[in-house]
Amino acid sequence: MPRIAFMIMLGLCVALAGAQPAAAADQSALSPAQKEEIKKLIRSYILENPEILPEAIEILQAKQEKAKGAKRADVLASRKEELFNPPEGTVIANPNGDVTLVELFDYNCGYCKHFFPTLMEVAKADPKLRVVMKEYPILGPSSAVASQAALAAMKQGKYTAFHFALLGYKGQLSNDAIMKVALETGLDLPKLREDMRAPEITAILKKNHELAQAFGIDGTPAMFIGDEFVPGAIEKEDLLKMIADARKK
């Protein structure tokens, strides 16, 4: 097996380099010349047996994902209230539901737009599902403007309607398109523009970005269903199953 052969080769390299057996796992026990010799032998082996690389990459990715998962669990334990009960109140389905789904999204994200009808279909079919939207604009300046406008619409009692309209917009949002959608939603544009400049809106978006970074989230959509993290859009059947599993817990 390639991996076993590689490990044997690595052991031989250490032995050939003259390291003491008890110090084989301690790189500090090797001299610079010994380390260089090991690097040369390992490189030579990899070049002669490149088929081991996919396996090595797969093992590395699995370790990285496991580490990320452990980190997310730690962050969730300490910041669950902040994630599930945002002070900005961006809850668009049953505030008193028994299972909470939190989605970090961007209004210019094609996957978010594609997934949103599925999410709303599930929320309609499951009246006990609580849905929290976390504004996470990462796809350019117009994404930030859209999130600022959506949060400002909260002051006119139209966050949910405006949210639906923005995610239903076809194509890339421009600043003019955002204002057009706002007008069609029945928002007072002069008030909206003034409210968009409020320091608390800037603070909300800054906090959302910091929270996403703490969880290691760098793409949208990203969801939490109960305590489970979902890195991307999923099919309706998978979504229903995860909600059911969260409800059992």
Image: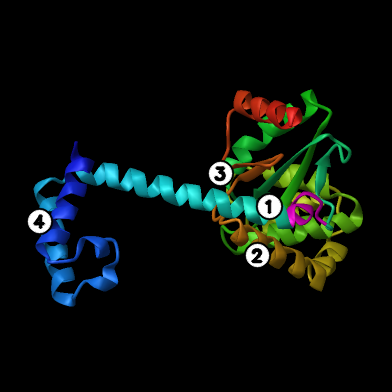
Q: Residue 210 bears which disc, if any?
A: 2
Q: Measure the C-alpha gap from mark 4 to mark 1.
A: 44 Å
The residue at 26%/65% (across/down) is 23
**x, y percent for residue 5:** 16, 43
Q: Measure the C-alpha gap from mark 3 to mark 2.
A: 17 Å
Magenta run includes residue 247: no
Q: Which residues are magenta?
A: 79-86
The residue at 39%/48% (across/down) is 61
Q: Where is the N terminus found, in terms of image quarters?
A: top left
The residue to which callout 1 is attached is 76
Q: Is residue 55 above or below residue 175?
A: above
Magenta run includes residue 82: yes
Question: Mark 4 or 3 closer to N-term?
Answer: 4
Q: Nearer the viewer, mark 2 or mark 1?
A: 1
Q: Is residue 164 above or below residue 240?
A: below
Q: Nearer the viewer, residue 95 or 49?
A: 49
Amino acid type, residue under disc 2 in the picture? Glu
The residue to which callout 3 is attached is 231
Question: Mark 4 or 2 closer to N-term?
Answer: 4
The residue to which callout 4 is attached is 44
